[in-house]
Image: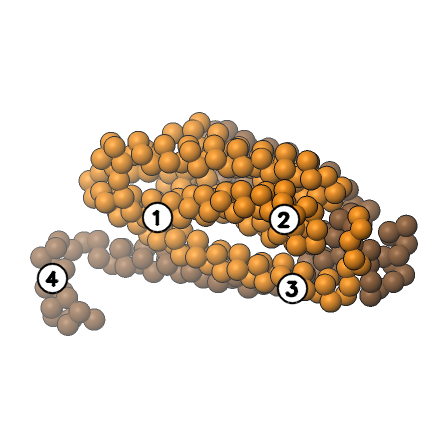
Amino acid sequence: MDLYLYYRVPHALPMNNHTYFEAIGFWPKAGTHTGRIYLVGYVLSLALTFGAYFLTPEYAATPIRLAILALAFALAQFFVQLACFLHLSREIDSRDKVWALSFVLTIVLILVVGSVWIMQNLNNRMMFQTPQEMEHYMQTQQGI
Amino acid sequence: MNEPALTHEAQNEDSTAVFGFWMYLMSDFVLFAGLFATYAVFKGNVFGGPAAGDLFSMPYVLVETVLLLTSSFTCGLALLAAQRGSIKGVITALSGTFLLGVGFVWMEIAEFRDLILAGHGPDQSGFLSSYFTLVGTHGLHVAIGLLWLVALAVSILARGLGRSSMRKLALFSLFWHFLDIVWIFIFTIVYLMRFL
């Protein structure tokens, strides 16, 4: 009955809790088994967590490879949780959130990658100097 | 439910509230990005003290992770109970979320306490400063979320599952899931990658 009204009376929906989350665009449209989605998300996240925990030491010979593998698990779990817990999808209601998220992820990437890159670069350039040479360098270069 | 019809305006208001809160969470991502960047830069600055690889107990962190992840799941269960209109179900699920969250914060405080008592507090080195700041900020978010959770549960018990309670549940669940997502990255970057 509720669904009947929902699709035929666009301006006044019955406020019972059953359709609230769909009505405000928070959950996927009625008919998708949200409970199942939460369960799938939970199990997948657990699997990815344990996978990262147990598999990374075994399959990663060097720390760099371990980092890449661990980050791959992390990104996978990130997207699983975005889809299953935060209900991000291709539906219209999700789109503004996805746009905002994409923008912020770009900023985050720039921040983190940029900082690490710059500091690595600085460290590499300064590595061969003793503190005395550093003093001397800064004085002659006037701190620039 | 003998609630008045949820008008188009009410729909819009509530979905706007959700989106506004989403924007706050996005800004929180940027905050954590800064803290992650700082940690990445300072990770090697151990000042002669212990490095990441020397300090962290992985089984302990795994338990913390499972606690927080499960609390995220029970939060979803709370929303499902709210959809059914069952106040009892909502309070049960929220209590589960609360207990698991308290467990997480407890373990984190214990970890911090042990580190500080062993002399490896945030004042010992740049690495430790950035570690305590990053993980501590996340823990603080969780603790404040727990306070919010208590207030939310009390509000639902007092006023029932009307429109405002439903909206508050939605906003809280966004916050709680966001915290678990940030923890995924802390778990990976701070703990799994501790030998990097």
Residue linked to disc 4: A135
Residue linked to disc 3: B16
The quadrant where residue A123 appears:
bottom left
Kindly indicate which chain is depicted in orange in the rendered structure.
Answer: B
Q: Is residue A18 left or right of residue B109?
A: right
In the image, A113 versus B86, the foreground residue is: B86
Q: Kindly identify the amino acid type of the residue bearing the numbered disc 4.
A: Glu
Q: Is residue B176 left or right of residue A43?
A: left
Most distant residue in the top direction = B59
Nearer the viewer's eye, disc 3 or disc 4? 3
Q: Chain of mark 4?
A: A
Kindly indicate which chain is depicted in brown in the rendered structure.
Answer: A
Residue linked to disc 2: B169
| Labels 3 & 1 near each other (Cβ < 8 A) | no
Residue linked to disc 1: B133
Q: Kindly identify the amino acid type of the residue bearing the numbered disc 2.
A: Leu
- Element class at badge 3: helix
- Element class at badge 1: helix
Q: Are marks 1 and 4 on the same chain?
A: no
- Element class at badge 2: helix
Dot 4 alpha-carbon crowd within 10 angstroms: few under 14, some 14 to 19, many 20 or more: few
Q: Position of residue B99 (x, y in %)?
A: 53, 33
| Labels 2 & 1 near each other (Cβ < 8 A) | no
Q: Position of residue A113 (x, y in %)?
A: 42, 57
